[in-house]
Image (spheres, rainbow, N blue to C red):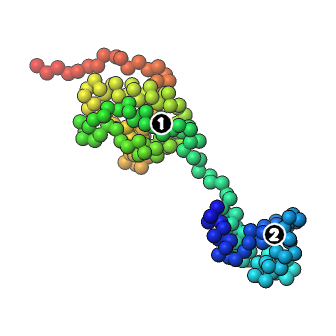
Amino acid sequence: MEELFEKLIREQITPNSFYVLYSLSKKTKPTDIVNSSLEITRLRNAGWLGSNLEITDKSIIFIEEISGYFRKSKKKSAQIIMGPDFMDNITSYNLLFPNKKLPSGSYARVNAKNLEAGFRWFFENYNYDWEIIFNATKKYVNEYSENGFDYMSNSQYFVRKQSLDKTFDSKLANYCEMIINNVDDDSPRFKERYV
């Protein structure tokens, strides 16, 4: 809002004058609350209006700039995409990973703020709720805990990891699908024995 008033002040146009100018540009009659004849005189003297009340090029550009302050952003907010308490859910998700370094040398948990972009992408591309995400994550961490967390992804790469071809993959999405489809992964694991 401050920026808007600063722009009006820089251009030496009052809010009432702008209202009249805008009304004339939309071919509507300003309300009687504003002294239209006084404002029209000011606008003519400053070059905002022509002698026949035509809108000047300068006015068209200025009205478009001011209108830009009121356009709604097309980008959805994080709350709309991930839910109102998304940061609490991201933190809870992150806490499901062990608080230690993985055998690969990276930490299992990354900063929760770093996860926000990954989860934003995840929710824009997949339709899973937080409960499924938590259950899928628990399943993933439990599986890898059996082998000392060898080859386990950290909390960020589990949500989304960029491939060589610049596309993104999500192990989390795969595990969410396993949870939805009740895939039981308790099948016996074969290990080679050396003699």
Q: Crowding near pointer 1: few (<14 within 10 Å), some, many (20+)?
A: few
The CA span between labels 1 and 2 is: 48 Å
Numbered circle sitting on residue 20: 2
Tell which circle, 1 or 2, labels the residue nearer the N-terminal end.
2
Where is residue 189? Give x, y as percent.
29, 19
Residue at position x 74%, y 72% in the image? 14
Residue type, numbered disc 1: Asp
Reading the image, the residue beneath label 1 is 88
Where is residue 108? Give x, y as percent.
32, 37
Say left or right for 45 vs 102. right
- Please tell me whether residue 60 is drawn above or below residue 143 in the rendered image: below
Residue at position x 41%, y 42% in the image? 112
- Please tell me whether residue 81 is drawn above or below residue 144 in the rendered image: below
* Nearer the observer, 103 or 44: 44
Residue at position x 34%, y 38% in the image? 109
Q: Quadrant of the N terminus?
A: bottom right
Residue at position x 54%, y 41% in the image? 124
Q: Give the image quarter of residue 90.
A: top left
